[in-house]
Image (cartoon, grey):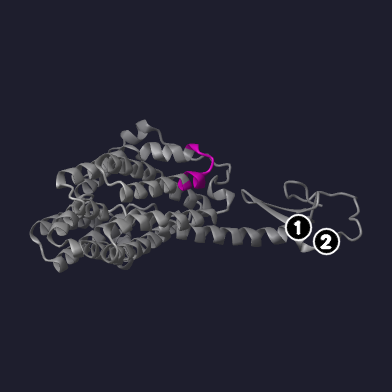
Amino acid sequence: MADCTGHSAKTDAVIPDGAGDIELSALALEFDGGRLDRRVGGGFASSATSKQTAPATRDAAARASARGLDWFTFFLADIQTGFGPFVAVYLTAHAWTQLDIGLVLTTGGLVALACQVPGGALVDAMRSARLVAMLAVAAICLSALALAIWPSFLVVMAARVLHAGASCVLGPVIAAISLGLVGHAALGARLGRNARFASIGNGFAAAAMGVCGYLVSNQAVFFLTAALAAPAILALTRIRMGDAEHPRNTGVAAPTATIRSVLSDRRLLIFAGCILLFQLANAAMLPLMAGIVTLRASEWASTLIAACIVLPQLVVAGFAPWVGRVADSWGRRPPLFFCFVALALRGVLFAFVSDPYLIVAVQALDGVCAAVLGSVSAPR
């Protein structure tokens, strides 16, 4: 017989006659942190049956969880796309000045910067990473509805702050779930798979929102963003493995890093400074261009911005694997240098280019930067 922990135990008890005739519907499967217990009424099935069923059930649960994470990453990218340059288009159409738009976008960026470390610490402290993710997605949904219904300065500012704070926990949540699903050995491949679905999601959402903005209105983009929260939460519910939230203790002490050790690592500080400067230059570039395009041709603005978002995603999907191989053979400094040069060139060209088709072509350089950073900075 099998005891409550799933291990076999010798016993002289006799299985009652007719126990094997119990219908399958009377059996209940419990999966908790990688342990599979097969209960029959108040007792347990034989350990041999449990050992045969456990691996198959565990593999099925792992595959379902992996697919759930794929779709969550996809729909989360859809949701986040609505808070990109479409915000600038929407606010410009409501006669907002570039100063007010820049102030709102900058405030959201500063909140996101300040909440990165607390957001990661919150994910570590919570028992359920999925619960944190659901609450964050719900908060982003509320932000989108507030933007669509009340485009006043205070409401928009509050919505951007709420969105920035909620977004800060989603990155650590995806990393934690990914680590729980595949472990350290396969984490790089899992993060690459996340990036693939995120890229596809960004492209799909940008195209859908561009069409929605052109055929309906710029306001409809944010209603669509809020509606996409439902399938994202549904995908989260498919991640059922307990190990996805609390990785199993292998008995090996995990290395820990203190704030002091991190701040004293000169190499890490230099890299962090480079990424900070990159983000400062990159974050507001397309939103500001979106505002200028809206002033020139408001009827085509949403469609043009959608094309500016879709093209970089295609570049990332096509070139990221090649960039990863180059980084492995040449080292990571050459691709990073090329990434920073591409960003500077993109900014210079945006200052002089006014033709819509050329603007879309220049935006391909954003895909080059994203492919390099996604391949070089991802854990290996």
Tag 1's secondary structure? strand
In this view of the protein, which residue sits in the foreground, 211 or 374?
211
Above or below, comparing residue 122 to residue 5 in the picture: above
Taking 191 as reference, is 207 above or below it? below
Which residue corresponds to the image point at 14% horizontal and 67% vertical from the top-left?
358
Image location of residue 336, percent across then percent down: 24, 54
Q: What residue is drawn where x is 55% and y is 42%? A: 252
Residue 267 location (% of width, % of height): 28, 41
How far apart are the alpha carbons under marks 2 and 1? 8 Å
Q: Residues within 10 Å of mark 1 (few under 14, many from 20)?
A: some
Give left or right: position of 368 versus 239: left
The numbered disc on residue 27 is 1
* Secondary-structure class at tag 2: loop
Residue 22's tag is: 2
Query: Left or right: 81 with respect to 234?
Result: left
Residue situated in front as seen by the camera: 82 or 373: 82
**Is there a contact, CB below 8 Å, between mark 2 and mark 1?**
yes
Question: Is residue 26 in view from this perspective?
Answer: yes
Look at the image and tell me in which quarter the C terminus lies.
Answer: bottom left
Q: Is 29 situated left or right of 366 in this image? A: right
Q: Residues within 10 Å of mark 2 (few under 14, many from 20)?
A: few
Q: How many marks can you see?
A: 2
Type of amino acid at the residue the image marks with label 2 = Ile
Q: Quadrant of residue 345?
A: bottom left
> Which segment is the magenta one?
125-134
Q: Amino acid at mark 1?
A: Leu
